[in-house]
Image (tube, rainbow, N blue to C red):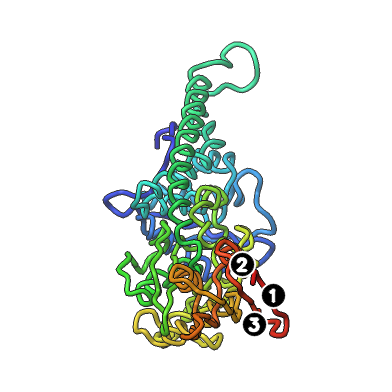
Amino acid sequence: MSNSRTLFRSITDEVLEQVMLVSVALNGSEIDTSREAEMIRLVESAGGVVVHRIGQRRNRPDGGYFIGKGKAEEIAAMAESMDLTTVVFDHNLSPGQVNRLEELTKCKVIDRTELILAIFAVQARTPQAKLRIELAQIGYMLPRLSGMWHHLDRLGAGIGTRGPGETQLEVDRRRARTRMVSIEKKLAAIDSGAKVRHSRREEMFSVALAGYTNAGKSTLLNRLCQADVRSEDRLFATLDTTSRRLELPGGGSVIVSDTVGFIEKLPKSLLSSFRSTLDVVREADLILLVADAADSDRLSRVAIVVDTLGKIDAGSIDRVTVWNKCDLPESSGNGTLSVSALTGEGIDGLVDLIRTKRREALAWCTLKINICTGDLEYWIRTNSIVDSFVRNENTGAVEVVCGLYRGLNHLKKRLARERPGWSVVPMSAQGQVERGTS
């Protein structure tokens, strides 16, 4: 293997790359077979295939190789005998550990974070997603650049310490930082346009689909909204936010949005790069936590999603767990809300729940207006759910029971502008009447 390394590494080739998977159990625990199975799927999603697995139990990571040196030598011998060139670890490694392992094994060594970044790079379809992935990759690789030129570096001071290795290292670092600034400017412009589009829908009730990767969020969006967004049975098939309108029974509509799935130890660089994409989750009125009812680790993965929601400041938003894939024989009921996005089972109940949550989030009141113009009636119907609208044909006065999208103050400002005689009775305080201009 060449000693020098490119800025970005990827294990995606036209031919599936054969990989050795190294699983390490820390603190004296046993090898987690579920975690190992997930790593195999991650490798497959990135374009590789695991042809050999090896594990080690340790009380704590080795500072030099993460695993013991003896185990590293065993991996090197095994990789040579099997003619393998790629070794994947199920933990994150330091730049020094990667460098030492690559030097010893003569193989490309990829840790969990870099593997996930590689998958995101493969799955990125839109220019926005590709920019965000590139930004995350640069941020991850920047502190690791020194290892790419270790064969030209010199340690210590004096003659020979300033050579082509150090020069190329500084050039790469400068180029990487310049590229990061350029990407951040482009993403800022994209995000600015997205905020303008979002502001046009801010009065609509917003539902965000969140969950562990491959829980079926995109399929659920398609089922709910009769959409045709891309959905695949693979990890991280969705990277961009997709929003569709859901028409509710009895009138009215909400916005349902699907975005990137979560995973255990989701790289911080990805959370940072996709922070604006995840705004749709942070700004939602309701989060549907979509969980795979057929997953043997469903409870722990729900806990991971809840933890990740807290990390992106979405932990306090009203949340309901939706157990998807209830049509599969291995599924297990973990709650009252079970659905199958594939067959449609339980979807009506989910829509009813969304409708109920939407009604609960509104500011309900009884509104009486002495004179209601056509423009004012249009405003009321546009900015609220109207349960009843009764007009006195003799006087022109109206009595309306409605739920306001943006609260009573929004209504009062609109009424004050026209200055009609009015009264408002909040539904939560029936006896307290607020009076406007007579």
Q: Residue furthest left?
A: 14
Q: Quadrant of the N terminus?
A: top left
Of 390 and 136, which appears nearest the observer?
A: 390
Residue at the spot x=54%, y=37% of the render?
A: 144
Give neighbour class at mark 1: few <14, some 14-19, many 20+ (Cα, 10 Å).
few
Mark 3, residue position: 427
Mark 1, residue position: 434
Mark 3 lies on a secondary structure that is loop
Of 404 and 285, which appears nearest the observer?
A: 404
Left or right of residue 305, residue 243 in this image: left
Q: CA distance from mark 1 to mark 2?
A: 10 Å
Of 264 and 220, which appears nearest the observer?
A: 220
Mark 1 lies on a secondary structure that is strand
Q: Which is more N-terminal, label 2 or label 1?
A: 2
Residue at the spot x=64%, y=76% of the render?
A: 423
Q: Position of residue 160 (x, y in %)?
A: 56, 14
Query: Which dot marks residue 412?
Result: 2
Check if mark 1's residue and mark 2's residue have beta carbons within 8 Å. Answer: yes
Q: Is residue 77 visible?
A: yes
